[in-house]
């Protein structure tokens, strides 16, 4: 019996490995879904934590390398290789010239993982539209999981503290990773909306899928609202606007009217999220004239990053150097940290270890060389997605827009960082077109990528 039990997993494993080799997008989808696995209350900013999603992303990278050695991968176009190579070179130069090279090595590894290796793995894994829809579906499913948990936290008052009340929806991530749930929900909402808009075939199953995706997007608006994340609201609104205008301008106008009406009914009539959402929305308009403490701290952190860059203009101070140089360059009024509280951790003060702006982070730690490399990557991906924004490419455009807007007031860090890598991989595939014979990107008339049989 012992021999039988030991042997049972082996045939399953033998069947699973070829399946992964034939459709590596399963690992990309697993990376997205495993973000939902609780990691416990950890200080996500103070150290490096390896999560289940990170392990899945590294498995995808390993499988990509294996397929590359076996000659089973489509060729990646030269422009994409140069863009990813530029990121590696910029991070390497910054590490060599760092104020603390030993500490910067871990930052170099993380930057290479997030902006090069995992996006390249996702790019190679997305071989057809089935792969793309599989990964987008995983975004929707992960968002629904987090959305249900977050909505329950708000309704039962078991979330993180907001204005002294335990009503802030944080999903399975906890108060120490306060932005994570809103990030996952935002991605899922945009993916669902894009899948719904891209399903235009007059088929019964397709119509059912379209309705389901519209329903998912509508539901996810509630947990996003009660996350009380102004940054996620702004990024989602702008990304959804780009998505709707690109898909159907008339639909964008109708959606805006319906969305406003729904907000009036839900918030004004039924009181869902009521005063908290209204108060948070009104604070967006005062970020320049009368900023609250969190906004004021962000401005000071941006100024700090600018001063660090002035001292290290060409290659920056080195990855992970901002937190070492912060106190010597920050104004005296900068807070010692931000507040975090929930039923599990109680009350804690979390140190502000980054500028909360990806562009300022790159500028201060990787200098002009780094900001040029990242700007080139983001600009080429954005233009490519705009040119091929049909079908799954529509979702890639919306998700990339969200990331680029979010980077104005946030940077990498936390459990959901790996999702940024998946989004960049989706955008790289959309920008390059779907692989055809010999691995080259192909298009149908009108810019819509398609597999050539």
Image (spheres, rainbow, N blue to C red):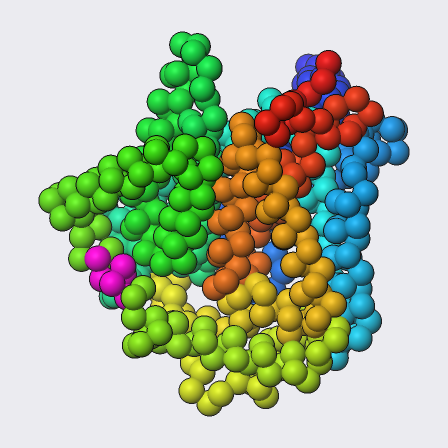
Q: Quadrant of the N terminus?
A: top right
Q: Position of residue 65 (x, y in %)?
A: 81, 38
Q: Visible in this render: residue 59?
A: no
Side of 101 relative to 414 (left or right): right
Q: Residue furthest front?
A: 445
Queried whether the magenta region covers residue 153, the answer comes back as: no
Q: In the displayed structure, would residue 435 be above or below residue 96?
A: above
Which residue corresponds to the image point at 60% horizontal and 38% vertical from the top-left? 387
Which region of the structure is painted magenta? 278-283
Side of 213 relative to 54 (left or right): left
Name the foreground residue: 6 vs 451: 451
Side of 408 relative to 280 (left or right): right
Which residue corresponds to the image point at 52% horizontal and 34% vertical from the top-left? 394
- Which secondary structure class fits the magenta region best? helix
Q: Quadrant of the C terminus?
A: top right
Q: Position of residue 147 (x, y in %)?
A: 36, 41
């Amino acid at each position: 019996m012992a021999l039988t039990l030991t042997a049972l997993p082996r045939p399953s494993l033998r069947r699973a490995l070829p399946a992964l080799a034939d459709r590596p997008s399963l690992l990309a989808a697993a990376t997205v879904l495993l973000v939902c696995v609780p990691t416990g209350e950890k200080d996500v900013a103070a150290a490096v934590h390896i999560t289940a999603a990170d392990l899945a992303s590294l498995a995808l990278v390993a499988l990509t390398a294996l397929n590359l050695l076996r000659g089973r991968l489509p060729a990646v176009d030269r422009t994409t290789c140069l863009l990813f190579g530029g990121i590696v070179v910029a991070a390497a130069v910054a590490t060599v010239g760092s104020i603390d090279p030993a500490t910067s090595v871990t930052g170099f590894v993380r930057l290479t993982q997030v902006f090069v290796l995992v996006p390249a793995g996702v790019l190679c894994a997305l071989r057809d539209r089935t792969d793309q829809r599989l990964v987008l579906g995983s975004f929707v499913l992960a968002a629904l999981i987090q959305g249900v948990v977050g909505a329950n936290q708000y309704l039962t008052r078991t979330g993180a503290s907001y204005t002294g009340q335990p009503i802030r929806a944080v999903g399975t991530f906890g108060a120490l990773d306060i932005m994570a749930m809103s990030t996952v929900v935002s991605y899922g909402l945009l993916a669902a909306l894009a899948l719904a808009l891209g399903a235009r075939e007059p088929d019964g199953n397709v119509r059912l899928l379209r309705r389901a995706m519209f329903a998912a997007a509508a539901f996810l608006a509630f947990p996003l609202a009660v996350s009380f994340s102004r940054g996620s609201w702004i990024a989602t609104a702008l990304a959804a606007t780009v998505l709707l205008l690109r898909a159907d301008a008339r639909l964008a106008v109708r959606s805006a009217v319906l969305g406003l009406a729904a907000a009036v009914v839900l918030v004004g009539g039924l009181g869902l999220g009521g005063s908290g959402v209204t108060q948070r929305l009104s604070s967006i308009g005062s970020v320049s004239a009368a900023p609250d403490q969190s906004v004021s701290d962000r401005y000071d952190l941006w100024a700090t990053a600018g001063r660090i860059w002035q001292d290290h203009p060409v290659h920056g101070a080195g990855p992970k150097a901002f937190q070492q140089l912060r106190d010597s360059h920050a104004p005296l009024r900068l807070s010692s940290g931000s507040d975090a509280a929930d039923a599990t951790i109680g009350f804690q003060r979390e140190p502000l270890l980054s500028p909360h702006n990806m562009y300022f982070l790159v500028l201060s730690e990787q200098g002009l060389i780094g900001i040029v490399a990242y700007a080139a990557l983001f600009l080429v991906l954005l233009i490519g997605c705009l040119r091929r924004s049909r079908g799954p490419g529509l979702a890639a455009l919306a998700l990339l827009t969200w990331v680029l807007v979010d980077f104005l007031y946030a940077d990498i860090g936390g459990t959901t960082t790996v999702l940024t890598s998946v989004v960049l991989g989706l955008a790289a595939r959309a920008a390059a077109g779907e692989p055809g014979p010999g691995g080259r990107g192909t298009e149908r008339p009108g810019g819509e990528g398609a597999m050539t049989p």
